[in-house]
Image (spheres, rainbow, N blue to C red):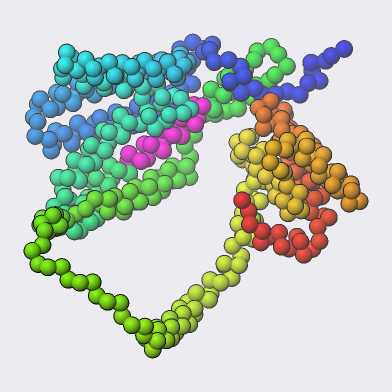
Amino acid sequence: MHDDKAQSAMVLPPWLVGSEAQEPLREAVSRARWLLASYWALLLSGYAVLFAVAALYWHGGATALATLGTLGLTSLVGTVAGNLVAMRRLKVWVIHVVVVLSIVGACLMAPVLGVATLWVVAFLWSVSGGFHALQRKFSLWSLWVPLICWTGAILTLVERTGMGRWQSGEKHSIWNPLAFGLLVVMVLFFFVFFAGQENYHLRVWQAGGNMGASRFETQALKSSLRLTGRGALALVLMALAVSGAVALVSPYLFRTRHESGSRDRQQRPSAEPREQPPRPPAFDADGLREAMRRALRRTREEAKEVLPFVPLFFLNRPLRRLFLMWRWRRRGQAPGARAQGLWRYVTLGLDDAQLGSKAGESLEEMVTRINTARAASGLAPVEGLAESASVYGRLRYGLGIPLGALDSLEQQSALAFRSVRESMSRWARFKSWWRQLH
């Protein structure tokens, strides 16, 4: 008689459960509250900064501010609509088709709609951005509207304060403390939004794995978004690093000077007769020997400075191998990444013994081939190889994560790595530390 309780408890991913939203809208909003808060903070702050800069530096007066304000309100309404549609689990391709066709239709109707086309396109694009803010893919699509607002404000400050000195050749004078501060805040908001997005998708995964009364159980993990002191410090440092790199590189993306008359000189034909190309000089043996002496002398002088770094060159591969072995086996990773890393640890030992997988070979075929080859050489099968391949294959093809599967894979992978390298000679094990890893 079959006993369901004897089955291994598993957690199914959401795409094996179904894509229809079973929870009410209030529960969906509660699950996405951190993501919505981070996205709306990014969006509203972008509109606020752009409106403040427009009031200070733009010359359109009340008309420009009224236009910008109504565009912002239209965009906010579209973002709300996109968020609601996303929480009702509408298919992504439906939004793509509807929004793209509507934008194309609005552009074709521009002679009829007139200036109202701008508001229609802003509403439709915001619907798409609000929808993709809650999706796993197309995250950058959702950032277009706040990115335009923040970038417009920063560029306005840059043009008003540092453009003259930048055109004179002082590259980094284009940045002022206020513009750079806005850039740091914008990048920091981006990082907070991505963190909220990861938190939301983890909650969706856990909610989607609930199968009710069945032999599958759901892991009830606490997934509230917690910002610790070290996490906040890491976000600030990352934002400063990214902003500093942007501020360092961006002034060199455009030419600061243009030589007047250069195009005229290039296009105007010269009235002077062209000179004949000079004849190649005769071979100068003495000059060549002198150049070689200078090159050798300079090489000896520079070798003294490079000599302390020679050991690092020889230790590059062993240090990289040691780092990869630690990273593949460390805990605290996502289940899929951890399983992938543990199996790569096994394949590292197999490659050291020249028993790695071949193209088009399945896991079972690889295990059979390796054990058969070892039996022909009078060696025992690799311990833990079949077990680790079985567990990894189950995780690889999305058949669920049995309880204790990752711990078992960790033990079996370590056993397989030691077992396959025991048959190698000491010289072969020593050489493997300098083997190039792909």
Residue numbers of the magenta segment: 185-201
Does 131 sit left or right of 121 as displayed? right
Please name the residue shown 30% across and 43% down the image.
183
Residue closer to the observer: 360 or 288: 288
> What x and y, as percent, mark residue 99?
34, 18
Residue closer to the observer: 258 or 12: 258
**Would you place residue 313 above or below residue 21 in this image?**
below
**Would you place residue 284 above or below residue 183 in this image?**
below
> What x and y, as percent, mark residue 429?
75, 60
**Would you place residue 297 above or below residue 399 in this image?**
below
**Would you place residue 294 above or below residue 142 in this image?**
below
**Quarter of the rendering containing residue 124:** top left
> What x and y, as percent, mark residue 419?
81, 50
> What x and y, as percent, mark residue 375?
89, 47
As for residue 64 lying within the magenta part, the answer is: no
Residue closer to the observer: 391 or 235: 391
| Residue ranking furthest to the right | 378
**Quarter of the rendering containing residue 172:** bottom left
Please name the residue shown 23% across and 17% down the image.
108
Does 41 sit left or right of 12 as displayed? left
Please name the residue shown 79% across and 40% down the image.
367
Split into 4 quadrants, where in the image is the N terminus? top right
